[in-house]
Image: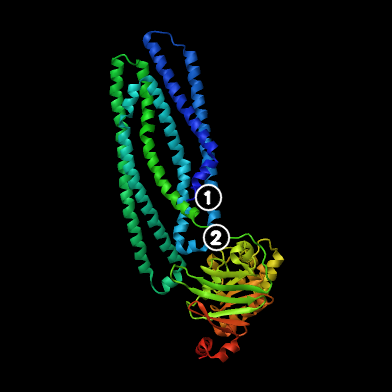
Amino acid sequence: MRKNVFLRCVLRYSPLFILELVLSWILARTVVEGNRLIGTAVDQLLSGADVEYASFLVFLLILTAAGALAAFMKSLAASFFSLRVQVRYRTMVAEKLYGLEYRYFDENGSGTVINKMNSDIAEADALLGENLPTVCQEAVSAATYAVYVGGLSLRLLLVMLVCYPVVLWITNYVVKKLTSLKKVFRQKTDRITEIAQDCMSGILVLRAFGAEEYFGEKLGRAADELVENEEKRTRTSNNAILIRRILGWLPNIICAVYAYVLVVNGSISIGGLMTFILILGRFVEAFVGLPFDIVEAREHWVCIRRVEDILRAEDEESGSETEGISAEDAVSFEGVSFGYSEGLPVLKNLSFRIPVGRTVAFVGDSGGGKSTVFRLLCGFYRPDEGKYLLYGRDFKEWDVESARERIALVSQNVFLFPDTIRANVAYARGEAGEEEIREACRNAGIHDFIMGLPEGYDTKVGERGVLLSGGERQRISIARAFLKNAPVLLMDEPTSAVDVETEGQIQKALERLSQGRTCVVIAHRLSTVRHADTILVLKDGAVAESGSHEELLAAGGVYASMYGKEEA
């Protein structure tokens, strides 16, 4: 199992953490020395000896200044340590998210991933910024005060520690219960986020079919379950607070009685008793509070473990090769089999080759494997069996970024980021200049439309491009493909969701885009691929037949039957 990344980040900045511990010890020592100084002065006064007030005050002021400086420096070290670890951890999680294999996003809901990236990492920030500094100070302070009390009277220290096993037992019980409830809380929160996200993404369908009440009830049930869980967690937390206060009183009572006995027996002086009482309050606060703050840290740790699930997930596979070894075939499959789930194959021993500069179309019934072929071509998944070759080189040998530089995708499901038109086109090639972006848009037939907008290329497209029509979004995606200028073009029925007039405009742009490129097309309407060099008919994950439009019609097989139904 991979080492916990959060702990690696903590170790990276451990010198700051060690400095924080040292400064916590210095602060605790100044408290002890200051109270010991007061106790000594009291004993001198009671014995009739003269007290040098000047030196007493000077020394007390020095201790106060040292304590204030130690407290300031400790707070500074804790802040620097917390901030550096938080930034490093967030950066590593973000970088990991971009490199995860595609399957991770299929298997994990977007609501869960969003919560892990936001609220769970915020819990890590709370652990570092608030909880951990408190635990460190309490641990160091309790140890320092215990050493002083032990030096004063070993028996008194043992009496102080008599309650500790009880504290440990109770906190261990609280830890288990709160940790379990925290896990459930996060799961319920994920569910609510997923439902809310589904509602927002599908608001058009939701309202069109009058499903508001259904989703409202669904969200309400999830919220009720969350509230029920939080009520249990609140009761447990409140019980823990009550127990903490009781345990705080108990050592005070026991120690005060026993200290009185020691004074009567002459084992400690009145000044020593006074110092002990002053230290006792601080010791009990740290001594009893430490286990309960550890409980809180364990609750935070539940969230860190959820984030670590992302960091432990498999990275996308990538080789190191950046060049192909063949200029004859752009793409070829050799006996490729693949399934999203074990025992449920989608592609079965699929083989084909696409020569450089040729256009090949995939047609077939829904579920035949067309979209899966595209996912494999993009490298989102790897074949379970067989080989996928890109320019003669096995895809698993390719550096995945270099491989994708050779592939441009134009899909029927266009995704635009909530940014400007310029930015959405420029994502294809970050270093592209303004004129290159405009030329790509001219080729896509969208430049004149953009210039007619009040803000031109600086126009915001809204979330998922909602402020633009389907045809406008599609032409922006085509401009993106023009700008990328990749030799292999994947087209997933890019004209399926537009009107006839817009389809003609898009088709012309696609014809310009296809010139000189290897084109792989998914077609639902067979009329759009009549001029393809080769048409592959997929059925149940295998090639049922292949050939040109005319050859397949003449064969009178599956394709001819599909074409006849479409024409009818």
Q: Which mark is residue 90?
A: 1
Q: Residues within 10 Å of mark 1 (few under 14, many from 20)?
A: some
Q: Nearer the viewer, residue 350 or 558?
A: 350
Dot 1: element: helix
Residue at figure coordinates x 54%, y 40% from the top left:
13
| Above or below: residue 92 compared with residue 203 | above
C-beta proximity under 8 Å, tags 1 and 2: no
| Above or below: residue 396 compared with residue 548 | above
The percent position of residue 229, horizontal first and vertical second, equals: 33, 53
Q: Nearer the viewer, residue 462 or 550?
A: 550
Dot 2: element: loop
Quarter residue 511 falls in: bottom right
Residue at figure coordinates x 47%, y 15% from the top left:
56
Q: Residues within 10 Å of mark 2 (few under 14, many from 20)?
A: some
The answer to whether residue 436 is visible is yes
Residue at figure coordinates x 53%, y 77% from the top left:
497
Under mark 1, the amino acid is Arg
The percent position of residue 49, horizontal first and vertical second, equals: 41, 8
Residue at figure coordinates x 69%, y 63% from the top left:
432
The residue to which callout 2 is attached is: 316
The answer to whether residue 474 is visible is no
Observer-side mark, 1 or 2, equals 2
Cα distance in 3D space between marks 1 and 2:
20 Å
